[in-house]
Amino acid sequence: MSRQNNALPEAVETAERMSTLFKGICVILPLLLLLTILPVQKVNAASGRPLELTLKVGSTAAKVNGKNITIQQPFIKNGTVMVPLGVFKKAFGSTVTLEQNDVVKVMYGPHTGAMVIGSTTAWKDGSKMVLTAPPQMVSGVLMVPLRFVAGVLGARITPGDGGGLVISLVPPENEEEIAESSIDSNVGKTRIGNSYYQWSLNYPSGLVVGDSGGNEAIATFVNTENLYYLEIHASPQQSPVDPEELLDGLVRAAQEGEETILDRTVHPEAKVPYARIVSKDSGGALWEGRQYYADGRLYELYLTDDSAANYKDLDKYASLLNSFQPVFDPADTSIRDLSTVKNGLREGYNEDYGIALHVPADWRMDDQHLLYESGKGSHLLAKVTSAPSGSTLKSWEEELEARIRDSYVSDAYTIRDSVTAEISGEPALVKEIQLGTGDDKSTEYQVLLLKNGYRYYVEYVAAAGQAKDKEKFKEILASIDIDFAAISQNFGRLESDDYTALRSKTVTKSSKTYGYSIKIPRLWTAYQDLFEMQNVDYRFTGGRLQINVNPEGSVEYTAGTLQSYYQNSKKDPDGPLIESVEESVFAGVPATVLTVHQNKGGVPARTQIIVFSKNDLVFTVTVTLNDINATAAQQALIEKTLQSFRLMNKGE
């Protein structure tokens, strides 16, 4: 069950996004290392050059940043390449700690990996994983799975000469030179925090950073001895709130979660005033919750201890919680920074596709689908598709321009000349397109790259009025890094995005439950395509198709209700305006057709609503199309789709 603040309206949207993060104790074994570490080379991160480790299965010869070294022979176990852990420190300056018993802890920046010697259980940033081969000692050297450790570090693995492997990593631009040492820990790091969200607290021994799904607004921690679990949330809160209001928020959230409140206090005298409650959830676990307000942000802390039986049992964590401060001093070298944000950007990464790129730090991040969105209409997406036979950058560019012309009326777009760029050593095209009319224009950038039969496409849209988003494109373009070997290793044939071929193709969808079928254009995107359900929803550029089936009511009642709904009784110039109500025939049966025009959210659009009945079911088919997208091609495709709608007789 998530902790979220329901009392403060400005934090509701952020709290809802947090709702997928559940409370619970994360089980992790004590961490320990049995390894002789090789000396580390000093790294000059400012050079921007990637650090490289080259090795080969069965060979003791290796190279670290061009320097020959001798290592324990890598070998293959259960299909997994096993390598000596020490080479990662030698090559990349990763941190390895020695704590207790049989667990190895590897850290690089904000990332932490843990493995158990002799076990296939491992953790990456707090997420439990299963290895195909366990770490093991060989002649006094700890051998570990190459791909797992490289993943923790964010390193890339590519084939080298003569069957070798190249592991490369670009270090952070502002990383300090890493001192040479035999075994590293977080030396001097007595506090931990987030520089972007501006908070810090004490960093006691045994505190392990958990996985927050890439959302830096949430930090999770577990104790290596399973003593406690801690969450820290940061969310926007522009209006100042006092401790009493903070307490109201904590109490309301607990009550809505059907928790029993055992204790509640406010602390206006504290350096940063806060509110505190202790509650018991439906599973019997005791939680201490705190809220702080500072500089336009709401901070929430939630701590639980499975062994706590009385609310006073949580008092032993007071020193840890009291150490929380809504401030982060970048000059304080004793603080471990969990943030990956640099210059307002953080890294997005998809290991399967081998794509890394920078994303505005305050955007919603979906690394799995490589989709990133602001709350104000801007977005960034990346995708990989199989290239059509004979495809070139020029032919691809022409396809995309044809799609723009088919999707926008002539005075609603301006296509700039394309420019060339280089991404990960390969040539690319960059296009800029202005979309919209008057001063209300968005800017769309398209990045096109072809490699090994695949199309790599990146789209960045700065919404109208979002000048700062537009300014970030050059830095985002420069950040794109692609591991071209990842696609061939992880995928075979992918879907094609050949617009010339796809724009005339359809797929037939049908509903046995409601007795109808329709041919949907392949280029339309399904938002709800379960045709055995009452509602179907498809989107396309500037438009939307919806189908609703209601087993109750009548055509007359439904059409009358719609006319009342769209009646512009206040004479609003933006509408809605009912342009026409006509009796017609649709799919072979009588139908009522309403046409409505309105300016919604500053976007003028026309909506056609078709209401008809068959087999005691009332159907409502709604098509909406923005004025700037009402091209002849779009309207013809909509009409073709509507004409394909077919009602089936019972038993078909």
Image (cartoon, grey):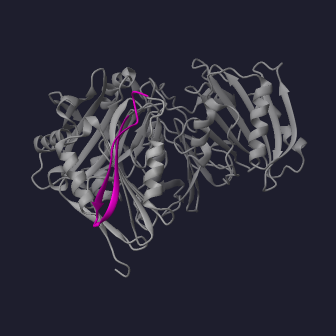
Q: Position of residue 185 (x, y in %)?
A: 61, 37
Asked which quadrant contains residue 642, the reply is: bottom left
Q: Residue at x 48, y 40 (%)?
A: 89
Q: Residue at x 76, y 22 (%)?
A: 242
Question: Which stretch is magenta?
Answer: 572-598
Q: Residue at x 65, y 21 (%)?
A: 239
The residue lying toward the viewer, choosing from 82 and 284, is 284
Type of secondary structure dominating the magenta stretch: strand
Residue 289 in view (yes/no): no
Q: Position of residue 611 (x, y in %)?
A: 38, 57
Relative vertical location of residue 560 with respect to residue 617 in this rendering, above or below: above
The residue lying toward the viewer, choosing from 612 and 38, is 612
Task: Report the side of 582 relative to 9 (left or right).
Answer: left
Residue 289 within the segment the image draws in magenta: no
The residue lying toward the viewer, choosing from 129 and 347, is 347
Q: Position of residue 81 (x, y in %)?
A: 41, 58
The residue lying toward the viewer, choosing from 537 and 264, is 537
